[in-house]
Amino acid sequence: MSATRKPRPSQPDRQGEGVFATCTLEVDRRGGRGETGALRVERALERSPGVRDADVSFRTGTVRVTYDEGDTSVEDIRELLRDRGVGVRDATGVDDTTTEGAPDGAATRSELRVEAAFVALTLAGMIAGLVSGPLDAPAAVRWVGYGAAYVFGGWYGLKNGIQTLRHWSVDIDLLMIVAALGALSIGAPFEGAMLLFLFSLSNTLQHYAIGRSRRAIRSLVEMRPESAQVLRDGEEVTVPVDEVEVGDVFVVRPGDRIALDGVVVDGESSVDQSSLTGESVPVPKGPEDEVFGGTINESGSLEVEVTREAEESAITRLIHMVEDAQSEKAPTQRLIDRLEQPYVLSVFGLTFAAIGVPLLVFDAAFEPTFYRAMTLMVAASPCAVVISTPAAVLSAIAAAGRQGVLFKGGEHVETAATIDAVAFDKTGTLTEGDTQLTDVVVREGGGEGGASSGETLSEDDLLTLAAAVQARSEHHLARATVDGAKERALDVPEARGFHAVAGKGVRATVPKTTVSSGIDSGGTDSDTTGSGTTAADTTVHIGNRSYFETVLADRAVDGLEAGLDRLETLEAEGKTSVLVARETGDGDGGGDGDDDDIRVLGWLAYTDTVRPGAAEMIERLRDLGIGHVVMLTGDNERVAERIAEEVGIDEVQAELLPEEKVATVEDLVERHEGVAMVGDGVNDAPALATADLGVAMGGAGTDVALETADVVLMGDDIGKVPYVVGLGRKTRRTLAVNLAIAFGAIALMVGTILLRGIPLPLAVIGHEGSTVVVSLNGLRLLAFRE
């Protein structure tokens, strides 16, 4: 990923006839705190043809648009933004995240330095104007000092206020400028200068707080090396990572960052993956172990074969998704942004009423009346309210990123706080997912020629048949079967006509030469059909109890009762098991002839191990008040119950098809305030999408996990699930405190002004002080630990 990024569409989302994609653009960040102008741009985008959804924030300088690729394009969106007066960053522009040739965050520091200089000049001018009187300085000194304070203190606010007025809107920046000019007009230049100083100071502190949250995540950019030491013709050649191809082998020396995702082909070492997965202890790596770009090799030298190109690597996709997450607003922030415009208008209305009513009704003096109205305007301004949410939510996203937890937007941080029930997939989530083949058993009397022929299959023959069929399946049991055949160095042929029945079993046609004892079902090696299929080719079925009792319900299956009895015994031992059967007729092996008999040849059994810490994780969820924990699995009930008992699960829903998992999650959503679904992001994708919060075991970045889930555990660390819930609740408490501080300060000052009156400087301190407090309180989430 280059230092300056191009707008990137995300994975297309097909809805009806349209193909929707999402891009994130960087725009000029405006100095003030109001988002009224951003909201108007957002609405203009949403009204334009082809745009499905838009998030615009001038505060953070990001625009995120979901659009129909058939109706509009990124360039059209850029042009619309420019027409609305929004500067879009291009490849040569600087932004508040990265710049070409500069370290991440350099542009932010540059902008902050300018803002800080303006704040210092405002303070200097205010002090010069204040002390000119006691020092008997010329009047020009006083007015030059106050003039500098007004110019430098009001520069950003006036600029942003004018931009907002151009679109017939008002915001907080304009409100503050009017209040300062009002103070000046009644002969209180110091109060106006103090307002502008504290306003610009709190703006700068706010930008620092949000910038720090953003930089905490953007530092991920530094984790990806720019080049790799690739082996070419036995020589090491330095190659830019964007030019390295899948299958290339590169060398990693001790202390180097691993350039790309890959598999170790030679060498042993330990790798620090904490920056990507949050794991605190280096992970041992050796041949056939997977490594991820951006992690640090510690002790030994490794040769790694590339498995993903640079743009598909775990670290690059993590960076892209974090960038999108920062631009997605939380529900509370969206609500506040929409209320800002009417609230500011109401403050202006209250101010005019505070001027007009005393003057017209009570014949009050103009100067004290106007002074009180300006004080009221400052006190009622919602600056602290507006900044309370993004300061907290962005900090939460940054804190989670440091722990290997990716929230795909502020909305999901708030959702995590509502979770009171959690559903877990079993395989690959609560268990390691590294399923091992434990039993290969040939049924007595189940030989290819039947009991009368005296010919029986060996275990290797049975495993060869099973591996040939399951080589075309991506199911974890199928992978374990194929791995078992590799361990025995079996020659597995290519099967044809593969067909899978989700959650039940598979079948395929296997050549006669597959087994050493021969499959003599009425033909010879030389016999062929017109389609080139030997008459001895055979269809092999592999499935669980449900497969044989439903899919093959109308077929005669020899040895089924004995096989099912054996499955029951194996499942009682906590093993997942399947039957292997073949069709014995003289047909073409396609398996569709009703006259074909089916004979059970034997069975296979598998086992999986519970993830370390799974039971402790469930206990921590209980401590957080999660009242209901469910396991959803397609595995058989006995195996599922054994795992559930071991880790402390409340409820088990076993032998579920994918659509049944979705129905179960829908039922949980109806019965609970918030439901999280935790899965591996492949077979569980529909259930992840159905839950209030989908949490994927990312495996450092499977496509389905990254695209479907709301939260991705980059290190497959199941122990991070309580962290997700805990961080969500801490964020919600922080938001509640921030809003209480913001609204409490407004209510206290407005009430006091109306009843007794307070000096304008005190209102300024109370208003800006509350803004700084909520910003710093939100920043505390960066240090969150469960």
Image (tube, helix red, strand yellow):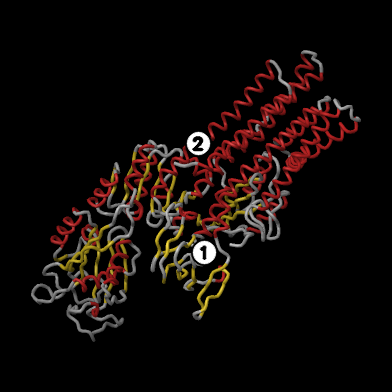
Question: Quick check: 28 left or right of 325?
Answer: right
* Residue 744 location (% of width, % of height): 60, 26
What's the residue at 79%, 16% (across, down)? 360
Q: CA distance from mark 1 to mark 2?
A: 40 Å
Question: Residue 644's mark?
Answer: none
Residue at image coords 50%, 64%? 258
Indicate left or right for 120 with 6 as reference. Answer: right
Nearest the eye: 283 or 380: 283
Residue 461 picture location, percent across and down: 21, 74
In the picture as drawn, the residue positioned furthest to the left comes out as: 452
Disc number placed over residue 256 in the picture, else none: 1
**Closest to the observer, 487 or 390:** 487
Q: Judge by depth and name the residue closer to the eye, 115 or 63.
A: 115
The reply to whether residue 312 is visible in this rendering is: no
Residue 488 in the image, given as x and y percentages of width and height: 26, 72
Q: Is residue 705 visible?
A: yes
In the image, what residue type sits under mark 1?
Asp
> As displayed, is residue 40 above or below residue 475?
above
Q: Where, quadrant-wise, is the C terminus in this rendering?
A: top left
* Mark 1: few/some/many CA within 10 Å (<14, 14-19, 20+): some
Pick the front one: 120 or 533: 120
Dot 2 amino acid type: Arg
Label 2 crowding class (10 Å Cα cut-off): few <14, some 14-19, many 20+? many
Mark 1 or mark 2: which is in front?
A: 1
Check disc 2 and report the residue beneath it: 732
On screen, residue 183 versus residue 576, left or right, reads right
SS label for mark 1: loop
Task: Verify CB contact (< 8 Å) between mark 1 and mark 2.
Answer: no
Q: Is residue 240 above or below residue 404?
A: below
Q: Secondary structure at mark 2?
A: helix
Earlier-in-chain disc, 1 versus 2: 1
